Image: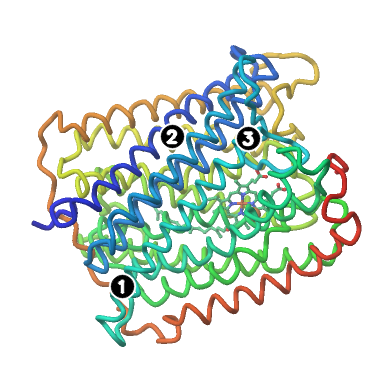
Amino acid sequence: MNLFVDRYPEEAWIVRAALASSFLALFLGGIMGLIQGLHRTGFLQIVQDSTYYTVLTLHGVSMVLLFTIYFLVGFFQWAVTDSLDRSAEDIRFTKLWYFLMVAGTVMAAAAILGGFTDATNLEADVLYTFYAPLEAHPIFYIGLVTFVIGTWLAGVDWFRSWWAWKKEHPGERTPLRAFMVMTTMLMWYLATIGVAAAILFFILPWSLGLVDSVNSLLTRTLFWFFGHPVVYFWLMPAYMMWYVILPKLAGGRLFSDPLARIVFVLFLLLSVPTGIHHQYVDPGIAEGFKFVAMTNTMFLLLPSLLTAFTVVASMEHGARQRGGTGRLGWLRSLPWNKPAFTGMALAGLMFAAAGFSGMVNAGMNLNYVIHNTLWVPGHFHLTVGTAVALTFMASTYWFLPQITGNGVFSQRLGLVQVLLWFLGMVFMGNAMHRIGLAGEPRRTAEPFYDGVTFDTALGSISELHFQIALGSVILTVSLLLFMAHLFLSWFDVASNPAPDNGVIPEALSGPENAPIVLENLRLWTAIALVLILLTYALPLASIVSANGFFGSAGTL
Ligand code: HAS
Ligand code: CU
């Protein structure tokens, strides 16, 4: 009786509900992605240019706010319950935060969907970055706030479990998965201060008509205070899978538990004080502050570089346990026939490329070349769209049986699905980066300067457009396969038994080797707060002193 669903049926229900919400968003967002991919490359323009921005908003919000966050709350619920081996303190509270998230989603979705029709005054064509001067119907912001409050309460729920566990296990190291959840949630609490302040004090009152204008630069800066760390909110659960599930699937054990803890503490410390790297070209922020953000960003590469080392070392260990030999020959001994493994490994491989495009973005001078071009969507389709999304989808092949009690429908079909996602992103990611270097702008329905042309010469703009469209189609096929497969597995069409493989093995270098100071999350949160104050107090003060709190909308 090792399956999670047998041990914790009520918690498994919440995990399933969160996953179902997540995949619904993925499906909706994916269809919007196809429409966009074909629209802006000139292949199929079934929506008006003005509706393109509704589609773009729905795509962005569904993918990066709903798909990712619903998945991670489900995954974190499993991680906390399973690793602490205790039920939720009060399952009604657990349901409360989930339903708050759903209520928020319904409000925000209604506002966005209103953009497709003139029958209501609902509209929210503000993209997933939703800062001023773009303005949405108030219900959009109220929905977002409700959704975020849901996640805050989810964090409270997990902290309550952790505190209760600690009381019963004095002096023991927190199990790795719970440690990762707590550090991620602390990072999230700090990050969301920015977006909560932007919405509650400025954007919502403005959208309600209570104030006439807002200081756009202030809302942008508060947004990016949140907008950079939110990307690690998506990444850290994917890293958790690379640390705890991937080594097991590779046939071995995690290389170092203490190193994994250090990585998560580094993310807690450094995720927020880097947000200004999204604003290198914003006037109104002094160069010096931008330079500080750049320096912090370069330090923030460290936890990912450490991850690359630890995860690959763990994979190598697994491969050698399975009889692999040679300097690179061990790669052949990895379980490439398993979609959960192959999907996650390919997601990691793609993230290596994505990390490099991130480094280019982060350099102040190089950023001037790529900012606001299609290079940036290229970067984030490899990070969140592949490293995170493909890891989430691939891990579902391992995870779903744990929470439904049903085996997956077909490993082979799963393998085809993850390979297609990787292939689709190879085309799309490559072409977006390259076309961005040629200067094609992002966030536009109409990137054509001379009308649509179809030139087949390799490397030409239209050939790159073709790669983007082809990538979108391949990704859609992969998505449809994933949804169909999910349905067949969830409803146990093949009656495959669920493998009883839920135990996560101990790391080679175990938790007892982790310095005890790592457990002191109050200390790390306090240091993170100081770093945030040091990087943000002066820029915010100068923005407010230049144009006041309410400046004027649209001055940027
Ligand atoms: Fe980024 C813009 C800088 C990581 C997402 N980023 C964006 C936007 C998004 C986004 C959504 O400095 C657009 C926002 C908008 O709409 O305007 N980003 C970075 C840097 C990193 C980085 C330095 N980004 C991410 C992650 C994201 C994400 C992660 C989502 C999940 N990004 C920027 C900057 C901008 C930006 C600027 C603004 C651009 C502009 O001008 O607008 C770093 O965290 C990256 C570090 C990563 C590495 C790679 C390590 C490699 C690993 C792989 C191991 C291999 C394995 C597999 C496991 C150093 C861990 C091996 C396999 C075998 C088979 C052996
Ligand atoms: Cu960033």
Most extreme residue toward the right, as rendered?
A: 546
Q: Out of 409 and 12, give the one closest to the viewer.
A: 12
**Where 65 falls versus 464 (above or below)?**
below
Q: Which mark is residue 520?
A: none
Residue corresponding to mark 3: 432
Give the left or right position of residue 376, taking residue 485 as reference. right
- Residue located at (53% from left, 82% from top): 523
Residue under circle 2? 26
Q: Cβ–Cβ below 8 Å for labels 2 and 3?
A: no
Q: Position of residue 11 (x, y in %)?
A: 25, 53
- Picture residue at 83% right of the left edge, 65% below the top: 541
Residue 453 occupies which quadrant of the picture? top right
Residue type (three-letter) at the residue carrying disc 1:
Pro
User: Taking 149 as reference, is 19 above or below it?
Assistant: above
Mark 2 → mark 3, Cα distance in angstroms: 21 Å
Give how far across and how far down residue 225 sits, in percent: 67, 58
- Is the residue marked by circle 2 packed among few (<14), some (14-19), or many (20+) residues within 10 Å? many
Q: Secondary structure at mark 1?
A: loop
Q: Is residue 342 above or below residue 528?
A: above
Q: Position of residue 185 (x, y in %)?
A: 47, 63
Seen at 52% across and 67% down, the residue is 303
The residue located at (81%, 69%) in the rendering is 538
Residue hosting label 1: 175
Dot placed on the residue nearer the N-terminal end, 2 or 3: 2
The residue type indicated by label 2 comes to: Leu
**Distance between the Cα atoms at labels 3 and 1?**
41 Å
Q: Secondary structure at mark 3?
A: helix
x%, y% of residue 36?
A: 59, 24
Callout 2 secondary element: helix
Query: Under 8 Å from ligand 1: the CB of mark 3?
Result: no
Distance from disc 2 to disc 1, alpha carbons, whole Å, reads: 31 Å
